């Protein structure tokens, strides 16, 4: 850890918000975009009798959601420690 | 052993188990009653949240809606899972840090206003009650089939059982019983799905079966598309609703998830802030098992249903099942009044097709068909009827009945707890009768519960939609009122008391108005201002999807009003800074 790093509460919050924003982009991309809005564009990619958009909407998006929460929780644990705001 | 006896035994055994656990862990002090002593492991809490969450809407109703809506029903799948991502990132850890019992308590403290707290209680009660109405529909369906009576009798029986069930437990009982319920319901949901997937595609995993080929080498979904169009329906995998509506509907369910009080209070029960984040993840894992199975259940249920009725080539003289030879499940469901047949062309056969499709009318006429003869197929019966339609062994059918009841009862109990605690704890103890004893507080909570059941049961008789749709309305209401207030409370220090109150009222009010406009005032049949059809809807937005707009109105008006009025006092700004960091969270105990 570099000594010049800003370890204030404001910096912790900023780092958290950055993480949240990245996750929200992924979250919206797999559900709203791949599953609904971009489905016509993905129609050419066949998946088991239908297309990729259908797969995202009825299965893929949910897998991504689960992974996202665990990844975020892990990242936040590290962030909590780095900024020394973790519990016990 | 015959099916009825077996069903009684399986349902009886599971109930004995839940009640046994509830008595074993009987609620002690009020603190325990509300948040189960706050020391529950995140995995266990995730499982209990999953049981709490997966209600009659998820278990009984959703796959039935998927079966008839096809791709469009993806909005339920994404909407009811995507909210957990928001919950984990935007709300759960901060509310756990704040460390109070209920959602209105947070809103009251953060917005330093009793008015805000009362408004939050009202929002919560409106959303939760609507949710319970959906559960009552599901409970009525399950009990009517199980007891072989009509829907109304089934509903009344269910109401009585729900009352005793919820009053007996309190939350500590409920946390452990909910873990048991989760196990029963997930077993009951996946076992028939595995059997049916094996039958149709030879794949034991339904999630893969959905995208697999059938015996003749044609993919299940491609075959289903073909079958549907042959009968004048839209393709199963095609999008039927407009894209804007679908996006808003999904969004409304997602933020509603993150705003529903009975889910949020579950995150007050874990030991630490970081556990709140993981707990949301575990909840979604357990929920995901059912939610990724549901699309397979839906697609396979409709395949089997049509296969049962349309026994031969479409249009051929003996291509349809004769009413004489209808299977036992058909007769059972006819008794409940949820499945109806009318021999329109008098040929004694059953024709099921889309008689609303004008392009198909000529074809239907050439077959000698005079209209769709399955005059009523309540979507909510599909999951319960599914194993019977697929001719699975009796013990599987009994198991599904037990699972359906577990799902409906656990959620109803969780919601009733949220309603009763908000009335007794937030309104009475917090505002109107501060000196109330613990004993009277518990009594008030129980009276509130009984009242809520009666109201919900009344509306359950004339539900404003299928169970999952009514529940979707509840999500829209939570989305438009609670979620924005909570999120701004954490992420925007500038939003003040007046802004929050105006925001919640504007969000809830606009959403309620839009819903009542198309569904009838207070859901009373015949009082709708306009027919509930896409042509009448604003930009084609369904009432269930309007929660997303309501939330935007809430955010917008709260921020605008806050800007024009005084900033929150310094100590509130410190409070917000404090809940943003995990360190210093109170222990998970009574206070």
Image (tube, coloured by chain):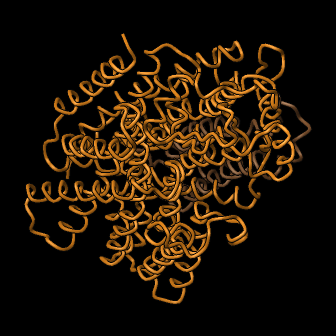
Q: What residue is at 54 percent from the left and 62 percent from the top?
A: A10
A79 relative to B50 in the view: left or right: right
Q: State the image coordinates of residue A86 (x, y, percent, origin top left).
A: 44, 45
In the rendered image, the vertical position of residue B505 relative to residue B73, given as above or below: below
Q: State the image coordinates of residue B60 (x, y, percent, origin top left).
A: 49, 37
B313 relative to B262 in the view: left or right: right
Q: What residue is at 29 percent from the left and 32 percent from the top?
A: B176
B516 relative to B1 in the view: left or right: right
Q: For residue B207, what is the image quadrant?
A: top right
In this view of the protein, which residue sits in the foreground, A26 or B390?
B390
Residue B448 visible within the image: yes
Give the residue furthest to the right: A44
Q: Which chain is brown?
A: A
In the rendered image, the vertical position of residue B3 relative to residue B226, given as above or below: above
Residue A88 visible within the image: no
In the rendered image, the vertical position of residue B586 relative to residue A43, given as above or below: below
Q: What residue is at 38 percent from the left and 27 percent from the top?
A: B402
Q: State the image coordinates of residue B581 (x, y, percent, origin top left).
A: 45, 54
In the rendered image, the vertical position of residue B490 relative to residue B113, given as above or below: above
Q: For residue B5, what is the image quadrant?
A: top left
Q: State the image coordinates of residue B28 (x, y, percent, origin top left).
A: 13, 42
Chain B shade:
orange
In this view of the protein, which residue sits in the foreground, B12 or B321?
B321
- Location of the N terminus of chain B by quadrant is top left
């Amino acid at each position: 850890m570099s000594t010049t790093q800003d370890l204030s509460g404001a910096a912790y919050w900023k780092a958290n918000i950055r993480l949240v924003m990245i996750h929200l982009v992924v979250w919206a991309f797999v559900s709203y975009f791949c599953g609904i809005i971009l489905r016509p564009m993905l129609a050419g990619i066949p998946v088991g009798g239908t297309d990729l958009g259908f797969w995202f909407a009825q299965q893929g998006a949910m897998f991504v959601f689960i992974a996202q929460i665990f990844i975020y929780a892990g990242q936040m644990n590290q962030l909590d420690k780095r900024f020394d705001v973790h519990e016990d | 052993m015959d099916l009825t006896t077996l069903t009684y035994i399986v349902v009886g055994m599971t109930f004995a188990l839940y009640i046994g656990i509830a008595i074993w862990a009987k609620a002690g002090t009020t603190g325990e009653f509300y948040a189960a002593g706050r020391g529950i492991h995140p995995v266990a809490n995730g499982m209990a949240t999953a049981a709490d969450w997966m209600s009659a809407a998820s278990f009984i109703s959703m796959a039935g809606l998927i079966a008839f809506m096809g791709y469009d029903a993806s909005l339920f799948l994404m909407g009811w899972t995507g909210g957990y991502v928001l919950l984990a990132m935007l709300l759960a850890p901060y509310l756990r840090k704040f460390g109070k019992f209920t959602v209105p308590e947070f809103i009251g403290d953060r917005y330093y206003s009793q008015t805000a707290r009362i408004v939050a209680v009202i929002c919560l009660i409106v959303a939760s009650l609507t949710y319970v109405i959906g559960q009552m529909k599901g409970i009525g369906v399950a009990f009517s089939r199980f007891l072989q009576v009509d829907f109304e009798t089934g509903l009344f029986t269910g109401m009585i059982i729900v009352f005793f069930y919820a009053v007996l437990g309190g939350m500590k009982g409920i946390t452990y019983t909910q873990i048991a319920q989760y196990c029963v319901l997930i077993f009951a949901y996946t076992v028939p799905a595995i059997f049916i997937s094996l039958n149709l595609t030879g794949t034991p995993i339904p999630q893969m079966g959905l995208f697999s080929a059938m015996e003749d080498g044609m993919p299940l979904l491609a075959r289903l598309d073909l079958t549907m169009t042959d009968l004048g329906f839209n393709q199963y995998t095609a999008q039927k609703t407009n894209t804007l509506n679908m996006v808003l509907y999904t969004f409304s369910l997602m933020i509603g998830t993150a705003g529903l009080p009975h889910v949020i209070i579950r995150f007050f029960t874990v030991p630490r802030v970081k556990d709140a984040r993981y707990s949301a993840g575990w909840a979604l894992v357990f929920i995901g098992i059912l939610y990724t199975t549901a699309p397979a259940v839906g697609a396979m249920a409709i395949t089997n249903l049509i296969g049962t009725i349309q026994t031969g080539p479409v249009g051929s003289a003996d291509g349809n099942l004769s009413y004489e030879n209808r299977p036992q499940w058909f007769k059972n469901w006819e008794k409940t009044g949820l499945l109806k047949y009318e021999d329109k062309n008098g040929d004694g056969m059953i024709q099921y097709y889309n008689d609303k499709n004008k392009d198909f009318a000529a074809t239907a006429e050439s077959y000698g068909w005079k209209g769709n003869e399955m005059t009523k197929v309540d979507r909510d019966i599909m999951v319960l009827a599914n194993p019977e339609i697929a001719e699975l062994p009796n013990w599987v059918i009994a198991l599904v009945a037990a699972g359906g009841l577990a799902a409906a009862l656990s959620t109803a109990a969780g919601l009733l707890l949220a309603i009763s605690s908000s009335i007794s704890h937030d309104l009475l103890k917090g505002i109107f009768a501060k000196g109330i004893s613990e004993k009277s507080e518990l009594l008030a909570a129980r009276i509130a519960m009984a009242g809520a059941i009666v109201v919900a049961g009344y509306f359950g008789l004339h539900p404003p939609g299928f169970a999952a749709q009514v529940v979707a309305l509840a999500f829209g209401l939570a989305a438009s009122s609670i979620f924005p207030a909570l999120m701004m409370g954490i992420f925007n220090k500038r939003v003040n008391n007046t802004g929050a109150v105006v925001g919640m009222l504007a969000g809830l009010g606009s959403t309620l108005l839009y819903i009542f406009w198309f569904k009838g005032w207070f859901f009373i049949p015949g009082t709708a201002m306009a027919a509930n059809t896409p042509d009448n809807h604003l930009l084609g937005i369904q009432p269930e999807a309007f929660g997303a707009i309501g939330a935007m109105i809430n955010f917008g008006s709260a921020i605008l009003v806050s800007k024009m009025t005084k900033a929150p006092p310094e100590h509130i700004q410190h409070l917000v800074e404090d809940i943003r960091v995990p360190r210093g969270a109170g222990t998970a105990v009574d206070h």
